[in-house]
Image (tube, rainbow, N blue to C red):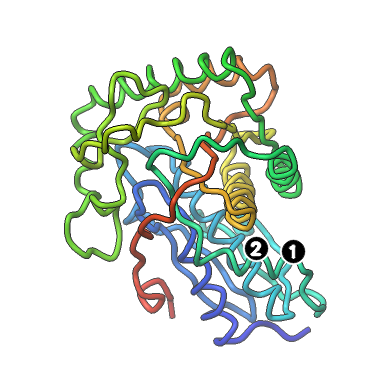
Amino acid sequence: MAGYDREDLLRAASAGIRAPSLHNTQPWKFRLRGGAIEILADPSRRLTVADRAGWAVHLACGAATYNARLALATAGAPAEVELRPDRAQPDLAARLILGRSRPPTYREKDLYAAIPRRHSHRAPFWPDPVPAEARRRLIDAARAENAWLDLLVGMVPLTGFAEIAKSADRVLRRNRDYQREMAGWTHADQAPDGVPVTAGAPAPEPQDLLPQRAFTERRRAPGRDYEPEPLVAVLSTPGDRPTDHLQAGQALQRILLTATDAGLAASMISQPIEVPAARDQLRRSLGRSGYPQLALRVGYGHPGPHAPRRPVTDVLLP
């Protein structure tokens, strides 16, 4: 069976680098090996304080893998995916092997078209509720990638989540090494990675229900409070191994692209996952046997600035 070529690698990597990553660290590399496209974790870009175990790197590489899958599928060359195929190469996150040729589905085309439009929306959303059909599509997107998405409906579960998230945020704010690391990935200039100050959320106010990263001290305009009852969703997987994190990353990206295709915006809330005690509390509050991997805030909002990306040539291995 023939394999992928250099043109396929460029197509997959160009889509892969548009995936989200914690603090926009972009911790991935791509290469062509024996006709297969491989996605590798870049340990030099792992957050040594916020991501000691490598969870965020694997989540990001999983999201990049999903984008690469879409790019190949829409070119009529869908991939069979192997996660962590070689334990002797711990940085090898995924291998994409050329599958049977077929035309792309309408859904694949729509999600692929959403890749350049997706970005994290940290500003307040409009008060318009997310329709039931859009919520169902988000749940189905997670299920299609062997994960699940719990929507926190009503003020009781939402307030409970907010308390957990705020508690975790306070723990992280007290950690000077954590704050120093985050500041190192926050830029006021045109850096090719990290979070631009202009993309950060406005400085938090006492009335805010959910915590926000302190990327900027910019105050919000009068009357621009955050929505009082946001739609919050928690993405979970059955296990908590590196392969589960990679699977969660693929599910995350499918959810985000589904939201973008539906005209929705989303931002990620990782503080309850980064603090072990908060994560355990969140897991018990959901009443499930799986493991929470990330929380999302979903709604409608004005398009904002896109986070920068390194050139695709910077992430290709020989």
Q: Count up the numbered dots.
A: 2
Q: Is residue 82 left or right of residue 215?
A: right
Disc 1 element: helix
Q: Position of residue 283 (x, y in %)?
A: 59, 21
Q: Position of residue 233 (x, y in %)?
A: 59, 33
**Of the residues shown, which amino acid type is indicated by label 1?**
Arg
Disc 2 element: helix
Residue under label 2, please give it: 111
Q: Quadrant of residue 178?
A: top left
**Of the residues shown, which amino acid type is indicated by label 2?**
Leu
Q: Which residue appears farthest toward the front when viewing the image? A: 223
- Asked whether the residues under the numbered discs 2 and 1 touch, taking CB atoms below 8 Å apart as contact, a structural biologist would say yes
Q: Is residue 50 left or right of residue 155?
A: left
In this view of the protein, which residue sits in the foreground, 133 or 78? Answer: 133
In this view of the protein, which residue sits in the foreground, 112 or 237? Answer: 112
Note whether 124 is above or below 26 in the view shown.
above
Q: Position of residue 120 (x, y in %)?
A: 44, 49
Q: Quadrant of residue 107?
A: bottom right
- The mark found on residue 107 in the picture is 1
Packing grade of label 1 (10 A; few <14, some 14-19, many >=20) is few
Please tell me which residue is depicted at 50% across the width and 58% down the height of the picture. Answer: 118
Note whether 114 is above or below 5 in the view shown.
above
Q: Position of residue 115 (x, y in %)?
A: 55, 64
Please tell me which residue is depicted at 66% across the width and 30% down the height of the picture. Answer: 150
- Quarter of the image where the C terminus is located: bottom left
Q: Is residue 168 left or right of residue 175?
A: right
Please tell me which residue is depicted at 37% across the width and 27% down the height of the picture. Answer: 211
Please tell me which residue is depicted at 56% across the width and 38% down the height of the picture. Answer: 128
- The mark found on residue 156 in the picture is none
- Quarter of the image where the N terminus is located: bottom right
Q: Is residue 211 left or right of residue 13?
A: left
